[in-house]
Amino acid sequence: MSGHGSTRRPAKFPLQLGQLGTKRAAPAEPLRPQRPLQEAERDRARATKPAGLGLDSEGVRRRMVERLRADGVRNEQVLSAMAAVPRHLFVDTALANQAYEDTSLPIGLSQTISKPSVVARMIELMLAGRTAPLARVLEIGTGCGYQAAVLARVARHVVSVERLRPLHDKARAHLALLPPLGLPTSGIRLVYGDGMLGHAPNAPYEGIIAAAGGAALPATWLEQLAPGGRLVAPMVEANGGQVLVVVDRDAQGQLHRRVHEAVHFVPLKSGVN
Protein backbone atom coordinates (compact mmCIF):
# COMPACT_ATOMS: atom_id res chain seq x y z
CA MET A 1 0.00 0.00 0.00
CA SER A 2 1.38 3.37 -0.99
CA GLY A 3 2.10 6.01 1.61
CA HIS A 4 -0.78 8.19 0.41
CA GLY A 5 -3.34 5.44 0.84
CA SER A 6 -6.29 4.61 -1.39
CA THR A 7 -9.97 5.36 -1.55
CA ARG A 8 -10.83 1.89 -2.92
CA ARG A 9 -13.33 0.20 -0.58
CA PRO A 10 -12.56 -3.50 -0.22
CA ALA A 11 -15.08 -6.28 -0.33
CA LYS A 12 -16.47 -6.99 3.09
CA PHE A 13 -16.02 -10.19 5.01
CA PRO A 14 -19.14 -12.03 3.84
CA LEU A 15 -19.93 -13.68 7.15
CA GLN A 16 -22.20 -11.53 9.29
CA LEU A 17 -22.82 -11.96 13.03
CA GLY A 18 -24.75 -15.10 13.80
CA GLN A 19 -22.95 -17.25 11.21
CA LEU A 20 -20.10 -19.74 11.79
CA GLY A 21 -21.85 -20.99 14.94
CA THR A 22 -20.71 -17.90 16.78
CA LYS A 23 -20.13 -18.36 20.51
CA ARG A 24 -21.32 -15.48 22.66
CA ALA A 25 -19.77 -14.60 25.99
CA ALA A 26 -21.88 -13.69 29.00
CA PRO A 27 -23.37 -10.14 28.86
CA ALA A 28 -21.32 -7.41 30.44
CA GLU A 29 -21.43 -3.68 30.80
CA PRO A 30 -20.54 -2.00 27.47
CA LEU A 31 -17.00 -0.80 27.05
CA ARG A 32 -17.13 2.83 25.95
CA PRO A 33 -13.72 3.92 24.70
CA GLN A 34 -15.28 6.76 22.70
CA ARG A 35 -17.52 8.50 25.23
CA PRO A 36 -19.37 11.67 24.13
CA LEU A 37 -16.78 14.29 23.34
CA GLN A 38 -18.64 17.02 25.19
CA GLU A 39 -18.16 15.06 28.40
CA ALA A 40 -14.44 14.74 27.79
CA GLU A 41 -14.15 18.43 26.96
CA ARG A 42 -15.90 19.35 30.21
CA ASP A 43 -13.15 17.53 32.07
CA ARG A 44 -10.75 20.30 31.10
CA ALA A 45 -12.39 22.43 33.76
CA ARG A 46 -12.14 19.87 36.55
CA ALA A 47 -8.82 18.17 35.95
CA THR A 48 -7.06 17.08 39.14
CA LYS A 49 -3.49 15.91 39.49
CA PRO A 50 -2.86 12.52 41.13
CA ALA A 51 -2.01 13.37 44.73
CA GLY A 52 1.67 13.31 45.63
CA LEU A 53 2.94 11.84 42.36
CA GLY A 54 4.32 13.50 39.25
CA LEU A 55 2.96 12.42 35.89
CA ASP A 56 6.38 11.13 34.91
CA SER A 57 6.50 8.87 37.97
CA GLU A 58 6.36 5.10 37.52
CA GLY A 59 4.20 5.10 40.64
CA VAL A 60 1.32 6.76 38.79
CA ARG A 61 1.40 4.10 36.12
CA ARG A 62 1.66 1.34 38.72
CA ARG A 63 -1.53 2.62 40.36
CA MET A 64 -3.28 2.51 36.98
CA VAL A 65 -2.04 -1.05 36.43
CA GLU A 66 -3.23 -2.17 39.85
CA ARG A 67 -6.69 -0.83 39.02
CA LEU A 68 -6.61 -2.81 35.77
CA ARG A 69 -5.57 -5.92 37.68
CA ALA A 70 -8.38 -5.39 40.19
CA ASP A 71 -10.83 -5.06 37.28
CA GLY A 72 -9.84 -8.45 35.90
CA VAL A 73 -6.85 -7.98 33.58
CA ARG A 74 -4.58 -10.94 34.24
CA ASN A 75 -2.07 -11.07 31.36
CA GLU A 76 1.28 -10.00 32.79
CA GLN A 77 2.60 -9.02 29.35
CA VAL A 78 -0.26 -6.56 28.99
CA LEU A 79 0.08 -5.17 32.50
CA SER A 80 3.84 -4.72 32.06
CA ALA A 81 3.31 -2.93 28.73
CA MET A 82 0.69 -0.61 30.23
CA ALA A 83 3.05 0.17 33.12
CA ALA A 84 5.89 1.03 30.73
CA VAL A 85 4.19 3.55 28.42
CA PRO A 86 3.67 7.12 29.74
CA ARG A 87 0.08 7.79 28.64
CA HIS A 88 0.26 11.48 29.57
CA LEU A 89 2.62 12.10 26.64
CA PHE A 90 -0.15 11.14 24.21
CA VAL A 91 -2.82 13.62 25.33
CA ASP A 92 -3.13 17.39 25.27
CA THR A 93 -1.29 19.19 28.06
CA ALA A 94 -4.57 20.54 29.45
CA LEU A 95 -5.81 16.97 29.96
CA ALA A 96 -2.55 15.36 31.08
CA ASN A 97 -3.62 15.31 34.74
CA GLN A 98 -6.33 12.80 33.82
CA ALA A 99 -4.08 10.59 31.72
CA TYR A 100 -3.98 7.73 34.26
CA GLU A 101 -7.68 7.71 35.06
CA ASP A 102 -9.80 5.07 33.33
CA THR A 103 -11.33 7.52 30.92
CA SER A 104 -11.20 8.42 27.25
CA LEU A 105 -9.94 11.87 26.31
CA PRO A 106 -10.30 13.94 23.13
CA ILE A 107 -7.36 13.99 20.73
CA GLY A 108 -8.90 16.13 17.99
CA LEU A 109 -10.94 15.55 14.81
CA SER A 110 -13.82 14.08 16.86
CA GLN A 111 -11.60 11.20 17.99
CA THR A 112 -10.53 10.10 21.46
CA ILE A 113 -7.80 8.06 23.10
CA SER A 114 -9.41 4.87 24.40
CA LYS A 115 -9.72 4.09 28.08
CA PRO A 116 -6.78 2.16 29.54
CA SER A 117 -9.18 -0.65 30.45
CA VAL A 118 -10.32 -0.97 26.82
CA VAL A 119 -6.76 -0.98 25.48
CA ALA A 120 -5.78 -3.63 28.01
CA ARG A 121 -8.87 -5.76 27.35
CA MET A 122 -8.42 -5.85 23.57
CA ILE A 123 -4.70 -6.61 23.72
CA GLU A 124 -5.31 -9.29 26.34
CA LEU A 125 -7.86 -10.93 24.05
CA MET A 126 -5.39 -10.81 21.17
CA LEU A 127 -2.66 -12.44 23.29
CA ALA A 128 -4.83 -15.02 25.06
CA GLY A 129 -2.99 -18.34 25.31
CA ARG A 130 0.32 -16.91 24.04
CA THR A 131 3.46 -16.46 26.09
CA ALA A 132 6.03 -15.27 23.51
CA PRO A 133 5.90 -11.83 21.87
CA LEU A 134 4.04 -11.74 18.57
CA ALA A 135 6.15 -11.37 15.45
CA ARG A 136 3.96 -8.81 13.67
CA VAL A 137 0.76 -6.95 14.58
CA LEU A 138 -1.47 -4.71 12.47
CA GLU A 139 -3.35 -1.88 14.18
CA ILE A 140 -6.26 -0.23 12.37
CA GLY A 141 -6.65 3.34 13.62
CA THR A 142 -3.43 4.80 15.04
CA GLY A 143 -5.13 7.76 16.70
CA CYS A 144 -2.61 9.53 18.93
CA GLY A 145 -0.21 6.56 18.90
CA TYR A 146 -0.72 5.31 22.46
CA GLN A 147 -1.99 1.83 21.66
CA ALA A 148 0.78 1.38 19.05
CA ALA A 149 3.31 2.16 21.79
CA VAL A 150 1.73 -0.43 24.09
CA LEU A 151 1.56 -3.01 21.29
CA ALA A 152 5.28 -2.48 20.64
CA ARG A 153 5.94 -3.89 24.12
CA VAL A 154 4.20 -7.19 23.26
CA ALA A 155 5.15 -7.56 19.57
CA ARG A 156 8.41 -7.28 17.69
CA HIS A 157 6.87 -5.32 14.80
CA VAL A 158 3.76 -3.12 14.77
CA VAL A 159 2.22 -1.67 11.62
CA SER A 160 -0.35 1.01 12.46
CA VAL A 161 -2.62 2.58 9.82
CA GLU A 162 -4.38 5.95 10.23
CA ARG A 163 -6.70 7.55 7.67
CA LEU A 164 -6.64 11.07 9.16
CA ARG A 165 -3.39 12.85 8.27
CA PRO A 166 -3.32 15.22 11.29
CA LEU A 167 -3.59 12.25 13.65
CA HIS A 168 -0.95 10.31 11.74
CA ASP A 169 1.42 13.27 12.14
CA LYS A 170 0.49 13.70 15.81
CA ALA A 171 1.18 10.04 16.54
CA ARG A 172 4.59 10.29 14.88
CA ALA A 173 5.47 13.29 17.07
CA HIS A 174 4.27 11.52 20.23
CA LEU A 175 6.23 8.35 19.52
CA ALA A 176 9.38 10.39 18.94
CA LEU A 177 9.28 11.28 22.65
CA LEU A 178 9.73 7.67 23.78
CA PRO A 179 13.29 6.61 22.78
CA PRO A 180 14.95 9.16 25.12
CA LEU A 181 12.94 7.49 27.93
CA GLY A 182 14.39 4.10 27.10
CA LEU A 183 11.35 2.94 25.11
CA PRO A 184 12.53 2.11 21.56
CA THR A 185 10.06 2.60 18.73
CA SER A 186 12.11 1.14 15.88
CA GLY A 187 9.64 -1.74 15.63
CA ILE A 188 6.69 0.59 14.93
CA ARG A 189 5.79 1.55 11.36
CA LEU A 190 3.16 4.26 10.94
CA VAL A 191 1.20 4.22 7.69
CA TYR A 192 -1.04 7.02 6.41
CA GLY A 193 -3.74 5.22 4.46
CA ASP A 194 -7.13 3.54 4.36
CA GLY A 195 -7.31 1.15 7.29
CA MET A 196 -10.03 -0.90 5.60
CA LEU A 197 -7.36 -2.08 3.19
CA GLY A 198 -5.09 -3.25 6.00
CA HIS A 199 -1.45 -3.15 4.89
CA ALA A 200 -0.57 -5.97 2.52
CA PRO A 201 3.19 -5.23 2.14
CA ASN A 202 3.90 -6.42 5.68
CA ALA A 203 1.31 -9.21 5.83
CA PRO A 204 0.62 -11.75 7.19
CA TYR A 205 0.02 -10.63 10.77
CA GLU A 206 -0.17 -12.79 13.88
CA GLY A 207 -2.44 -10.19 15.44
CA ILE A 208 -4.82 -7.56 14.05
CA ILE A 209 -6.57 -5.06 16.30
CA ALA A 210 -9.07 -2.42 15.15
CA ALA A 211 -10.28 0.77 16.84
CA ALA A 212 -13.40 1.24 14.69
CA GLY A 213 -16.34 -0.99 13.86
CA GLY A 214 -18.56 -1.68 10.86
CA ALA A 215 -21.34 -4.09 9.92
CA ALA A 216 -18.85 -6.60 8.49
CA LEU A 217 -15.13 -7.26 8.72
CA PRO A 218 -13.23 -6.18 5.60
CA ALA A 219 -12.07 -9.20 3.59
CA THR A 220 -8.59 -7.69 3.40
CA TRP A 221 -8.15 -8.00 7.17
CA LEU A 222 -8.99 -11.70 7.10
CA GLU A 223 -6.75 -12.27 4.09
CA GLN A 224 -3.85 -10.65 5.95
CA LEU A 225 -4.34 -12.71 9.13
CA ALA A 226 -1.70 -15.43 9.44
CA PRO A 227 -2.53 -19.08 10.22
CA GLY A 228 -2.64 -19.23 13.99
CA GLY A 229 -3.33 -15.48 14.06
CA ARG A 230 -6.08 -13.63 15.90
CA LEU A 231 -8.12 -10.53 15.05
CA VAL A 232 -9.90 -8.39 17.64
CA ALA A 233 -12.35 -5.75 16.44
CA PRO A 234 -15.71 -4.12 17.23
CA MET A 235 -18.54 -5.09 14.92
CA VAL A 236 -22.07 -3.74 14.45
CA GLU A 237 -24.96 -6.10 15.20
CA ALA A 238 -28.30 -6.16 13.39
CA ASN A 239 -29.87 -4.09 16.19
CA GLY A 240 -27.33 -1.31 15.65
CA GLY A 241 -25.25 -2.03 18.77
CA GLN A 242 -21.62 -3.03 18.74
CA VAL A 243 -19.91 -6.09 20.17
CA LEU A 244 -16.29 -7.09 20.46
CA VAL A 245 -15.49 -9.91 18.04
CA VAL A 246 -12.47 -12.24 18.09
CA VAL A 247 -11.62 -14.18 14.91
CA ASP A 248 -8.99 -16.94 14.86
CA ARG A 249 -7.47 -18.50 11.75
CA ASP A 250 -6.43 -22.08 12.42
CA ALA A 251 -3.48 -23.92 10.85
CA GLN A 252 -5.74 -25.13 8.03
CA GLY A 253 -6.87 -21.60 7.23
CA GLN A 254 -10.38 -21.94 8.66
CA LEU A 255 -11.87 -18.96 10.53
CA HIS A 256 -13.50 -19.26 13.95
CA ARG A 257 -15.32 -16.39 15.60
CA ARG A 258 -16.37 -15.60 19.16
CA VAL A 259 -18.51 -12.69 20.31
CA HIS A 260 -17.66 -10.90 23.55
CA GLU A 261 -19.06 -7.91 25.42
CA ALA A 262 -20.89 -4.87 24.07
CA VAL A 263 -18.64 -1.96 23.08
CA HIS A 264 -18.96 1.53 21.65
CA PHE A 265 -16.39 2.61 19.04
CA VAL A 266 -16.40 5.14 16.22
CA PRO A 267 -17.73 3.88 12.87
CA LEU A 268 -15.33 2.18 10.47
CA LYS A 269 -14.77 4.41 7.42
CA SER A 270 -12.89 4.06 4.15
CA GLY A 271 -10.69 6.57 2.38
CA VAL A 272 -8.22 9.11 3.75
CA ASN A 273 -8.52 12.74 4.88
Image: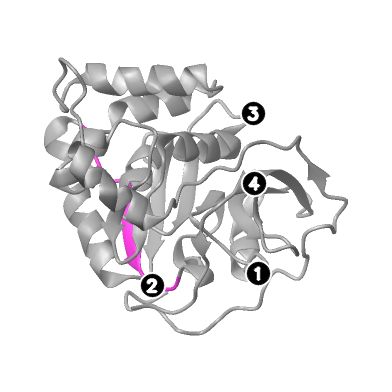
Residue 147 % position (x, y)? 38, 45
CA–CA distance between discs 3 and 4? 22 Å
**Label 1: which residue?**
219
CA–CA distance between discs 1 and 3? 25 Å
Q: Residue at x 52, y 70 (%)?
A: 196
- Image quadrant in which the N terminus is located: bottom left
Q: Label 2 near label 1: C-beta < 8 Å?
A: no
- Image quadrant in which the C terminus is located: bottom left
User: What residue span does the magenta drawing correspond to?
Assistant: 183-194
151 left or right of 11 in image: left
Q: Residue at x 44, y 51 (%)?
A: 35
Q: Residue 239, relative to residue 88: is it above or below?
A: below
Crowding at mark 3 (Cα within 10 Å: few <14, some 14-19, many 20+):
few
Residue 149 visible to the viewer: yes
Q: Residue 38, relative to residue 100: is it above or below?
A: below
14 left or right of 53 in image: right
Nearest to N terminus: mark 1 or mark 2: 2
Nearest to N terminus: mark 3 or mark 4: 3
Q: Label 1 near label 4: C-beta < 8 Å?
A: no
Residue 126 % position (x, y)? 57, 40
Q: Is 169 or 36 nearer to us in this picture?
A: 36
**Label 2: which residue?**
193
Q: Residue at x 17, y 54 (%)?
A: 173
Which mark is nearer the camera, 4 or 2? 4
Q: Label 4 near label 3: C-beta < 8 Å?
A: no
Q: Label 3 near label 2: C-beta < 8 Å?
A: no
